[in-house]
C-alpha cells in the first residue's frame, strides 16, 4: 500500500452523492438545437469555419483552434448550422458570446472516422496530433487544452489521474469509472506512452469503493491480457484510495496527497516531474484515439432535490440546460437555484438556454433550503477558522481585509494569486462572509489593473515614438530647406559665371525700388510758395472750423451739464492754441511774401464801391431831368473807378505770389 | 606655534581629500534625468488626452514634479490621484472639475462609409492608433486607442463616435459583495412620523 500524505486544511461538507450515483449513465437523445460556444477552454477562442446554412455531419470540425493554447470544436450531431450568433455563455458573468448554433436533423450521421485499435503502434507526434485534432481539454472544469500538458519540457516520473471528485453532489467521474474502467486504463496507457512511461497513480476518494474496485479489476484484466500475469510488481498503474476531504481533487492538493511534494510557487506540476490529468480527459483521449471520435459528448450529473430523475447523463456538447433538465424531470417550480458545477465552486445560472460545454460536469437543481441561502453577512469576528480550512495555507482573513479595502498590492503580497477559490474558507465562516467573491473581485481587479498598466505602457511608448518622429520630421524638413536654398544659390552662381552680363535679379529689383523712391523724393521737394500759402490757409481754416464746432459742442454740454464738459473744455483750449498758431504761421508767411490781405481788401472794396456808384448813376440817367450834370458825375465816378481798379491791379502786380509752375514728374524721366 | 600651523595644514589637507572624494562621487554616480518624473509618468494613465492642459502625460508628470496640482487628470480619476498622493507624500485632493470629470472608458470608432480620408484625425491621434492614408478610408486600431477624444473635434464630417468599451467574458470580473452586513439591517426608524 502506497503511503498517503495529507494537505493543510480542507473541510468535510455533506457528500450528497448517493442521489445521483445509483443508476447507470443514461444517454440523452439528441436535442433539437445545439449551441456551441467558440470559447469553451482557457486560451484563444476557436474560429468558426462554417457558415449559417451549412450542413454538418456528426464529428465534423466546425471551429478551428487558433494558436497553441486553443482547442478545436466539432459538430456533436448532424444538421444545419442555423446561426453564428451571440448566446448566453456558461460563464459566471452570464454574458453572451460567439456561438455556432446547429439545428439537428435527428439522423446523427457520423463523418468518416479512423479508429486506431492499437494505439501503441502510433508514434508520439501522431498521437499528439490526434488528441489536438479531437479538441480535448481538461474535463475537470478548468478547461486547459490537454495537448499542451502532454508536451512537458522536463522529464516526467509520475502521471497522476485525478479521479478524486471531491466536490459534493457530483458523481459523473464515479459513474464513468464504474462503467468505463477498461477504457480508462487503455487511455492511461496512451498517456504513459506519450510522456515516457512514468508510473501512474489514480487518486480516488475512498467514498467511491465501487469505482476503485472497477479500476483495479480493469488493471488486472489488462495485465492478464498483455503479460498473463497479475502480480503487483508488474503494475505501473496504481489506484490510490485517498481519504474523503474537500478539496482533495485540487491538482496541487492531490499531488501533495499522493507524492508528498508541493508544486513550487508560480510553478507547474511538470517542474517536479508530475503531470496530472482528469479521469474524464483520459476517457476522452481513449475515444479520440481508439474510437476516432472527437470530443463531442460528456457525462453530466443532474442532481438536487428538484430533480426527480437525478443521475448521470451522456449529453452532447452544446445541449441547452433546459433540454437536459427536461429529460431528467427537474421540477423548475421547485428549483430555487440552478447551479452549474458543484455547490462549492459552481455558479448560478439564470438562463436555462445556456448550453452545456466540454467542462460542464454537473447541474444542481437545488430546492429551497437545500443550499445555504444567500444571507446578509455579519462582521468578521477574527475567529481564524478560515485559516484552518485553507488548503493552500493562505491567510484568508487578511486577504478579506485587503480585498475589502481595495489594497490589492498587499493582497498580492499575501499570495492572493495562489487562492484556488475552493470555497472552504467561506464554508466554515461563522459570519457567512462571501469570502471567495471578495477574492475573485480582488483577482479580477488585479488582472484589469495589470492589463491597463500594460496598455498604458504601450501607449506611452507609442506617444514617445510619435513625438520623436515629429521632431525628426521637423529637423529633416529644415535640413531639406537648407539644402534646397544652397542648391538654388549654387545654380544662380553657375548661371552668372556662365553669363557674366546677366545681372543679379535681386540687385536689379532693389535698384529699381531705390530709384523710384528717389524720384518721389525729388518730385516732392520744391513746393511753390503759392502752394504753401494755400496749404497754410487751408490748415488755418480747418483749425478754425474745428474750434468753432467744438466750442458749440462745449456750449451744449455745459447747458446739459454733461459729464464730458471737462474733456471738451480741454479740447477747446488745445484747439484755440492750435488755431492761433496756424493763424500766426499764416500771417508770418504773408509777411514773408510781402502780402497784405487787409490792404488788398480795402482796395477791392474801393473798386467795388466806385463800380457801384457808376452803375447807380447810369441807372438814374434814364429817368434824370438833368442829364448833363449827371453825365459829368458819371465821368467823375468812372474816373474814380478806373483809379481804384488801377491801384488794385498795381498792388496785385507787385504782391502776387509768383506762380512757380509745378514740375510734372514725367518731364524729368 | 608649530602646532597651530600643523593643525591648519592638516585641516586643509583633509578638506582637499574629501573634496576630491565628493567630486569623484558626483561624476561617478551621476543620476541622469529626473527619476521622480519617470515615477509620476508611470502612474499616469498615458491617455495623452491633454485634459490636464499639457500636451501629453509626460509633460504633466514634469509639471507635477515642479509643483503643479495632482488632481487634473480625469482619465486617471481618484485612483491616480491616490497613487500620486502616496508617491509624493501629499494629501489626496478631489478631481479638479475644471479639467473634466471621471467618465467610463470609451474608444473611438470611425463610421467608415462616411470617412472622406482627410487624415486630420491621424494627425490628431497622440498614440498613432488610427490607420489610413489621404483619400483612403481610416479606421481606429481598437486595441491601441486610449479614448482621448482628440480625433473627434478635427473630423470635418463628424464621423467619429466615442463608444464605451464593452465588457467581454474575458474582461469581466466579479464585483465586490455589497457592504451589507446583517447588523446594519436592524430595524431603524426609517419612515415618516405616523400622522394617523
Image (cartoon, helix red, strand yellow):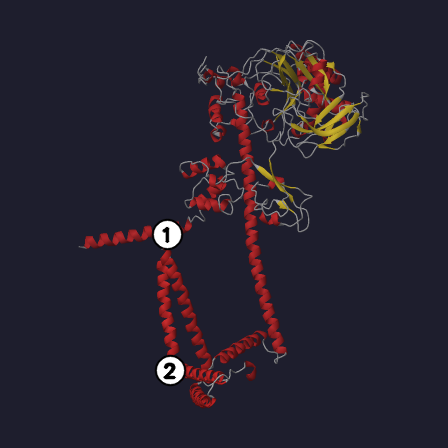
Q: Which mark is residue A530?
A: none
Residue occupied by mark 1: B23
Residue occupied by mark 2: A591
Q: Position of residue A668 (x, y in %)?
A: 55, 84
Nearest the viewer among B49 and A143 is B49
Q: Pointer 1 indicates a residue of which chain? A: B
Res B36 quadrant in image: top left
Q: Position of residue B98 (x, y in %)?
A: 47, 41
Q: Residues within 10 Å of mark 2 (few under 14, many from 20)?
A: few
CB atoms of marks 2 and 1 within 8 Å: no
Nearest the viewer among A300 and A239 is A300
Give the SS element for disc 1: helix
The residue most toward the left is: B1
From the viewer's perspective, is residue A107 above or below residue B99? above
Q: Pointer 2 indicates a residue of which chain? A: A
The residue under the point 43% across, 76% down is: A537
Residue A119 in view, yes or no: no
Amino acid at each position: 500500500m502506497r503511503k498517503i500524505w495529507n494537505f493543510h486544511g480542507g473541510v468535510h461538507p455533506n457528500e450528497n452523492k448517493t442521489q445521483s450515483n445509483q443508476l447507470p449513465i443514461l444517454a440523452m437523445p439528441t436535442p433539437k438545437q445545439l449551441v456551441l460556444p467558440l470559447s469553451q477552454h482557457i486560451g484563444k477562442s476557436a474560429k468558426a469555419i462554417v457558415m449559417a446554412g451549412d450542413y454538418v455531419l456528426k464529428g465534423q470540425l466546425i471551429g478551428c483552434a487558433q494558436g497553441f493554447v486553443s482547442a478545436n470544436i466539432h459538430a456533436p450531431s448532424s444538421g444545419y448550422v442555423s446561426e453564428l450568433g451571440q448566446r448566453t455563455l456558461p460563464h459566471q458573468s452570464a454574458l453572451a458570446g460567439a456561438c455556432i448554433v446547429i439545428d439537428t436533423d435527428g439522423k446523427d450521421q457520423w463523418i468518416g472516422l479512423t479508429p486506431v485499435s492499437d494505439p501503441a503502434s502510433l508514434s508520439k507526434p501522431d498521437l499528439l496530433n490526434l488528441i489536438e485534432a479531437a479538441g480535448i481539454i481538461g474535463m475537470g472544469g478548468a478547461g486547459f487544452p490537454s495537448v499542451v500538458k502532454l508536451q512537458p519540457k522536463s522529464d516526467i516520473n509520475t502521471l497522476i489521474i485525478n479521479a478524486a471528485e471531491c466536490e459534493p453532489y457530483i458523481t459523473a467521474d464515479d459513474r464513468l469509472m464504474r462503467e468505463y474502467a477498461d477504457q480508462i486504463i487503455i487511455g492511461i496507457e496512451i498517456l504513459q506512452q506519450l510522456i515516457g512511461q512514468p508510473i501512474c497513480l489514480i487518486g480516488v476518494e475512498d467514498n467511491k469503493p465501487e469505482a476503485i474496485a472497477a479500476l483495479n479489476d480493469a488493471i488486472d484484466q489488462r495485465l492478464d491480457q498483455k503479460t498473463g500475469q497479475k502480480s503487483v510488481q508488474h503494475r505501473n498503474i496504481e489506484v490510490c484510495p485517498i481519504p474523503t476531504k474537500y478539496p482533495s481533487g485540487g491538482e496541487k492538493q492531490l499531488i501533495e496527497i499522493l507524492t508528498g511534494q508541493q508544486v513550487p510557487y508560480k510553478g507547474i506540476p511538470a517542474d517536479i516531474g508530475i503531470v496530472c490529468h482528469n479521469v474524464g480527459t483520459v476517457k476522452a483521449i481513449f475515444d479520440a484515439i481508439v474510437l476516432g471520435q472527437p470530443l463531442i459528448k460528456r457525462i453530466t450529473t443532474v442532481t438536487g432535490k428538484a430533480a426527480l430523475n437525478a443521475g448521470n447523463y451522456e449529453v452532447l456538447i452544446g445541449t441547452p440546460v433546459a433540454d437536459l433538465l427536461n429529460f431528467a424531470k427537474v421540477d423548475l417550480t421547485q428549483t430555487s437555484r440552478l447551479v452549474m458545477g458543484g455547490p462549492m465552486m459552481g455558479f448560478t445560472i439564470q438562463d436555462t438556454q445556456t448550453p452545456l460545454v466540454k467542462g460542464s460536469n454537473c447541474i444542481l437543481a437545488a430546492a429551497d433550503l437545500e443550499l445555504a441561502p444567500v444571507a446578509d453577512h455579519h462582521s468578521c469576528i477574527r475567529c481564524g477558522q478560515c485559516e484552518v480550512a485553507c488548503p493552500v495555507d493562505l491567510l484568508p482573513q487578511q486577504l478579506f481585509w485587503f480585498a475589502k479595502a481595495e489594497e490589492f498590492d498587499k493582497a498580492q503580497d499575501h499570495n492572493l494569486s495562489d487562492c484556488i477559490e475552493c470555497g472552504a474558507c467561506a464554508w466554515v465562516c461563522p459570519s457567512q462572509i462571501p469570502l471567495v467573491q471578495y477574492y475573485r473581485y480582488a483577482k479580477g481587479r488585479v488582472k484589469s489593473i495589470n492589463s491597463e498598466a500594460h496598455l498604458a505602457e504601450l501607449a506611452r511608448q507609442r506617444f514617445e515614438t510619435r513625438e520623436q518622429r515629429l521632431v525628426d520630421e521637423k529637423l529633416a524638413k529644415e535640413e531639406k530647406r537648407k539644402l534646397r536654398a544652397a542648391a538654388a544659390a549654387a545654380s544662380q552662381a553657375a548661371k552668372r559665371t556662365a553669363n557674366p552680363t546677366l545681372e543679379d535679379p535681386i540687385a536689379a529689383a532693389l535698384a529699381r525700388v531705390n530709384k523710384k523712391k528717389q524720384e518721389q523724393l525729388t518730385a516732392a521737394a520744391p513746393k511753390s510758395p503759392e502752394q504753401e500759402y494755400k496749404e497754410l490757409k487751408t490748415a488755418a481754416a480747418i483749425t478754425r472750423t474745428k474750434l468753432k464746432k467744438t466750442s458749440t459742442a462745449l456750449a451744449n454740454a455745459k447747458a446739459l451739464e454733461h459729464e464730458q464738459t471737462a474733456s471738451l473744455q480741454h479740447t477747446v483750449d488745445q484747439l484755440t492754441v492750435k488755431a492761433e498758431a496756424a493763424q500766426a504761421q499764416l500771417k508770418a508767411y504773408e509777411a514773408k511774401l510781402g502780402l497784405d490781405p487787409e490792404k488788398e481788401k480795402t482796395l477791392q472794396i474801393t473798386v467795388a464801391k466806385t463800380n457801384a456808384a457808376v452803375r447807380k448813376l447810369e441807372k438814374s440817367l434814364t429817368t434824370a431831368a438833368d442829364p448833363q450834370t449827371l453825365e459829368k458825375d458819371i465821368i467823375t465816378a468812372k474816373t474814380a473807378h478806373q483809379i481804384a481798379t488801377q491801384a488794385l491791379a498795381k498792388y496785385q502786380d507787385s504782391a502776387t505770389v509768383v506762380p512757380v509752375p509745378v514740375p510734372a514728374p514725367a518731364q524729368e524721366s | 606655534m608649530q602646532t597651530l600651523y600643523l593643525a591648519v595644514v592638516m585641516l586643509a589637507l583633509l578638506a582637499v581629500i574629501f573634496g576630491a572624494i565628493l567630486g569623484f562621487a558626483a561624476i561617478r554616480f551621476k543620476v541622469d534625468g529626473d527619476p521622480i518624473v519617470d515615477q509620476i509618468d508611470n502612474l499616469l494613465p498615458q491617455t495623452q488626452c491633454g485634459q490636464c492642459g499639457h500636451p501629453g502625460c509626460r509633460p504633466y508628470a514634469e509639471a507635477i514634479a515642479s509643483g503643479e496640482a495632482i488632481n487634473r487628470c480625469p482619465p486617471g480619476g481618484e485612483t491616480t490621484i491616490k497613487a500620486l498622493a502616496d508617491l509624493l507624500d501629499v494629501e489626496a485632493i478631489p478631481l479638479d472639475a475644471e479639467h473634466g470629470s471621471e467618465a467610463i472608458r470609451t474608444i473611438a470608432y470611425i463610421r467608415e462609409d462616411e470617412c472622406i480620408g482627410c487624415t486630420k484625425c491621424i494627425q490628431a491621434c497622440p498614440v498613432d492608433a488610427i490607420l489610413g492614408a489621404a483619400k483612403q478610408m481610416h479606421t481606429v486600431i481598437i486595441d491601441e486607442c486610449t479614448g482621448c477624444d482628440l480625433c473627434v473635434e478635427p473630423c470635418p464630417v463628424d464621423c467619429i463616435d466615442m463608444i464605451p468599451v464593452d465588457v467581454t467574458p474575458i474582461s469581466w470580473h466579479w464585483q465586490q459583495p455589497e457592504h451589507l452586513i446583517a447588523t446594519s439591517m436592524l430595524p431603524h426608524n426609517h419612515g415618516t412620523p405616523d400622522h394617523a
